[in-house]
Image (cartoon, grey):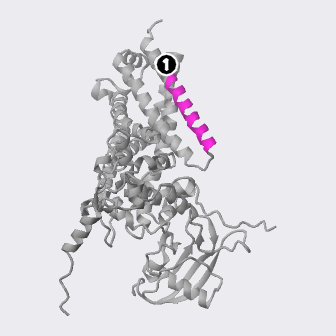
Amino acid sequence: MNSKPTSHNNRLGLRGWVYAGKYTFERYLYLAHRLTGMGLIAYMILHIIETANRMRGVEAWQGLMGLFASWPFKIIEYLLFAAAVFHALNGVRLMMTELGFFLGKPKEPVYPYSSSIKRHRPLTYIIMALAGLIIILGGSSLFFP
Amino acid sequence: MRETRLWSWHLLVIPIIIVLLGLHFAVMHYAPVFYGISVEKAREFETMIERGKSVTQLVLYILLLAAALYHGLYGLRGIIRELPMSPALGKIVDYSVIGLGLFIFAFGTYVTWWTYSFKIGG
Amino acid sequence: MSDKTTTPREITFRVRRFDPDLDSAPHWSEYRLHVHDGMTVLEALHQLKAQQEPTLSWRSSCRMGVCGSCGMFINDLPQLACQTQVLHLGTDVVSIAPLPNYDNVKDLVPDLAPLIEKHAAVKPYIIYLDQIEIDEPSGEFLQTPDQREEFSQFTHCIKCGLCLAACPTVATDPLFLGPQALAQAYRYTADNRDCGMKERLSAIDIFHGPYQCHLAGACSQACPKGVDPAFGIQLLKRALVLDSIGFGKKKSSVAKIMPLADVVKQLEEFAPPPRTV
């Protein structure tokens, strides 16, 4: 009996989320949105557990706040802030476009083809510029109060 | 229509999160601007308890908790279930995420209520 | 410096080979071929097969970009081999692999059965108010050019499968309907002759449906016919949300029928003048 496979599984798997070909940057915005989302959920759950330390009394609370005021945590806090700003602003873009707004109108395709992705690229650039600005301003207020 | 409704709520809670999380950031990081106290003072135990005693804070925190948990855990459920799995395992993932969400919501609501009803000095 | 995209020269073709009867895993083979301006990847494959590697296998048919058979992963992008000119790729090494996210049957041949099954699952045909009118038409559906334009671009799908090869969700989730099926679900939903949203719901309002599209946009980039399936999926989401809150297509807005007698009368109005010879 021939035990060789009759076909080869060519599914990309998790690698397909990260790099699957020479696609445009919107695909990487999808990846960044996914990564920041997972980071934010993990943080949110930890944050709820950590702030519940208030129930252990003043000393426990002050100790925790002292720890979070130290530099490694300030960096983590800034990265979280950056992740939240990116995720929120990209999320606003996705909320609007996934309901069909800012994508133009269906039209008979004429070569060279346009696409809804290209048509809403100006919006994408504005959102990314805004996110970058807020992240830089936030950083300057955190590190240079 | 189940998936459509679940996804619609995932979108509907976004403005709630943006507004309430924005307020939360403002309270914690821009305390000098909004409350005239330093960031360190804003994080002190007594200040935190004082803030937690308002009914508005109680309601808004619970609302933010519910909205953020729903939005985040719907996303997490989507990411996990996009991995190859049987329909049975998919159902287990769904129920686990719901269970986790309810547990954290209950815990967070309890902590918020504890703060609201806490009496400084005993 | 000569233009890399037009200068005829020797090109190295890195082709992924897999023979299920001989190989346990795919491997790469290299061939060199002199390429002239205008030569497509498909023509290059034919030459390689004729002159160097008779066992090389792939799928192709029309060689003019309308049948959708020759989809391949060329220089890290899913493309139709007949529509890709070798020199326009601009590289001295051209890599050719079978489409990702499909089982690889042999060499450059993907198993497109999942694509066809998912397409069939969304009921890709007009579902009218009564089936008798579809089976035994009594006249002509009335549809204005504007109503046609609402979904016309999505009718150009040639089922080549490049979009599923590009989609990050298809990469991990074998049950995800994919850009092709979902865009076709929208094509029929948006058609004013169709009122089959309810019949299609069980196929599309599922976890593996449109809500697992996260607008990565790779499908629209890969599509060789300008169908823009990503656009179709977002419009489908909007249609589903509207339908869920009671603002879906009403039966009264479905296309009316012009009786055959009136159609004939209209045709007679535009009949040619009587013959003079």
* Residue at (17% x, 91% y) in the render: C276
What stretch of residues is rendered in magenta?
A: B87-107
Which amino acid does the dot numbered 1 rest on? Tyr
Q: Mark 1 highlights which residue?
A: B110
Report in which chain the residue with disc 1 lies. B
| Residue C198 appears left or right of A4 | left
- What main secondary structure does the magenta stretch of the protein show? helix
Q: Which residue of the protein is positioned furthest toward the right in this rendering? A: A1
Q: Position of residue A22 (x, y in %)?
A: 47, 66
Name the foreground residue: C10 vs C113: C113
Q: Position of residue A102 (x, y in %)?
A: 29, 53
* Residue at (30% x, 27% y) in the render: B32
Which quadrant of the view contains residue C192? Answer: bottom left
Q: Which residue of the protein is positioned furthest toward the bottom in this rendering? A: C277
Q: Position of residue A51 (x, y in %)?
A: 49, 25
Q: Is residue B97 magenta?
A: yes
